[in-house]
Image (cartoon, coloured by chain):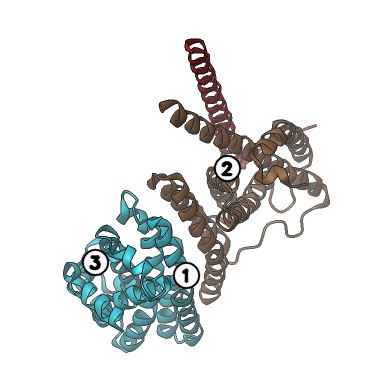
Chain colours: A brown, B cyan, C red
Amino acid sequence: MFAFLYNPDRFMAFSRWAAPLFGAIAAVLAVVGLWLDFAAPPDYQQGYTIHVMFIHVPASMMSLFVYLCLAVASFLGLVFRQPLADAAARAAAPLGAGLTLLALVTGSLWGKPMWGTWWVWDARLTSELVLLLFYLGYMALQAAIDDEARAARACAILALVGVVNLPIVVFSVDWWNTLHQGSTLFAPSGQGLAPVYVPPFLIMIVAYLGAFGALWLVRIRAEVWRRRANVLAVRAAR
Amino acid sequence: MVLMRRELALSWGRGGGPMLAVAFYAAMATLLPLATGPAPSQLAVVAPGSAWLALALASLLSLERLFERDYEDGALDLLALGPAPLELVAAAKCLAQWITTAAPLALAAPVAAVALGASTALMPLICITALIGGLGFCFCGGIGAALSLGSRRGGLLIAVIVLPLFAPPVIFGAGAIEAYAGGLDWRTPLLFLCAYSLATAGLGPFAMAAACRNALS
Amino acid sequence: MLYLDAGKYAPYVWPAYAITVVVFVWLIGDSLMRARRWRRAVEAREKDAAADNHERDAAE
């Protein structure tokens, strides 16, 4: 049943219809979500800035979800020696980095009018920044090793180390903020969200999920073709 | 045991080992007031934290050579095939690194912090946290060094990889010092620092060995 | 119908949406271009390989 996960041909057949489908669903949901978003009256507390939440929170949730996907793909590639899993991990990294960047920038733009500052070193933002550093390090390591199989394995080890490290980072920054109590108290987003905002919020989250799914599948397809092209090139050179 | 002796000898002699780290550290301590302005009140606030940060950066220095020399001259292949498991080899390397660079730095750190305006009462704690944190830095750094074996731009790459891993010990170590200075609970962060360093010392060698085997394949 | 007047928050809200659009366009464009490029490369090489086989068969 899960043959499409490790068999390249089955995967290509699956993604051929799955990728456009996910993309279409994501696009439709995004339009609907944004429409509902702007059709709702401005929030009593947050004013017009509430609209940033609809693109910030999905981005940050997805940045962590992609990280998880990358770690799982790395694990599968490392333990079961699946080249498709390696390709999946490699493909996910730029998407994760982009989403993390979005989360940071939109979060900053949300924070300035809300809490008066562009940046604050609380657990969430700081660990998001560390996450971005991880993605960049991952992509740097990938680019620095020429042998593909070796690069994939090294990156897989890094991903597994990183996935263990991130909760520790979150914990440490959280502790550090309790030490510096009184400097800032960050009210988490989504607290006391007015009911009129809930549907577009959920829709946007699913839209982002669909977008990631579609883009990830497309990128893995590109990876599969790239490897096939390289194999054919080597064969032709003989 | 033979392994430890060899690693110790290697890392002591490598590029002037401890002297280089201490010299770098002194340079950082000198540059800091030049950058932030000599006002004592300003400096005193950041002194313990930046002394700690400089420690992290100085540990990055000799990381690149940790595995690379053996990798280049083929000794790593022999070590991988030898009687001692590769995990133990990696652990020995990091321990040797810790003894030769972290120990002298742990002595230099309190001095630098005081020079920057920290109170002398903090000195013992700074020394202890530098020692414990140094262990974490060496093993995390070892993971980065092993992963970037055989790649281009080794040194910079190691730093980028290792930064997320350095964050918790930096936070806990500096936090412990600040807590002590502020009269707050400093034992908790110190314990977390110990926990992190011991965890990396225990688990790190597995990642390092896997990375070394990958590079040798 | 749609509340589009951002008032004083405009310099924060619209740039946030703008950069989201930019990043997504870039990710989508890059992914699709990458896929197209490598699919074309595979097709080109397969055609070459087929042509080579033809020549070889014809020469024998």
**Residue B206, disc:** 1
Residue A203 position, x and y percent, is 77, 43
Res. B71 image quadrant:
bottom left
The residues bearing labels 3 and 1 have C-alpha atoms spaced at a distance of 33 Å
Going 57% across and 36% down the picture, which residue do you hit?
Answer: A224
Same chain letter for marks 3 and 1: yes
Mark 1 closeness class: few <14, some 14–19, many ≥20 residues within 10 Å: some
Quarter the N terminus of chain B occupies: bottom left
Question: Which mark is in front, 3 or 1?
Answer: 1
**Badge 2 element:** helix
Tell which residue pokes out farthest to the front in this image. C60
The residues bearing labels 2 and 1 have C-alpha atoms spaced at a distance of 47 Å
Going 25% across and 81% down the picture, which residue do you hit?
Answer: B5
Quarter the C terminus of chain B occupies: bottom left
The residue singled out by tag 3 in the image is B28
**What kind of residue is marked 3?**
Met
Mark 3 or mark 1: name the one nearer the start of the chain.
3
Numbered marks: total? 3
In this orientation, which residue lies closer to the viewer: B213 or B112?
B213
Question: Compared with residue B126, is residue B147 higher up or lower down, i.e. above or below?
Answer: above
**Badge 3 element:** helix
Residue C52 position, x and y percent, is 48, 17
Viewed as shown, does residue B177 lie left or right of A35?
left
Residue B134 position, x and y percent, is 35, 76
Going 34% across and 53% down the picture, which residue do you hit?
Answer: B150
Question: Which mark is in front, 2 or 3?
Answer: 3
**What kind of residue is marked 2?**
Tyr
**What kind of residue is marked 1?**
Phe
- Chain for mark 3? B
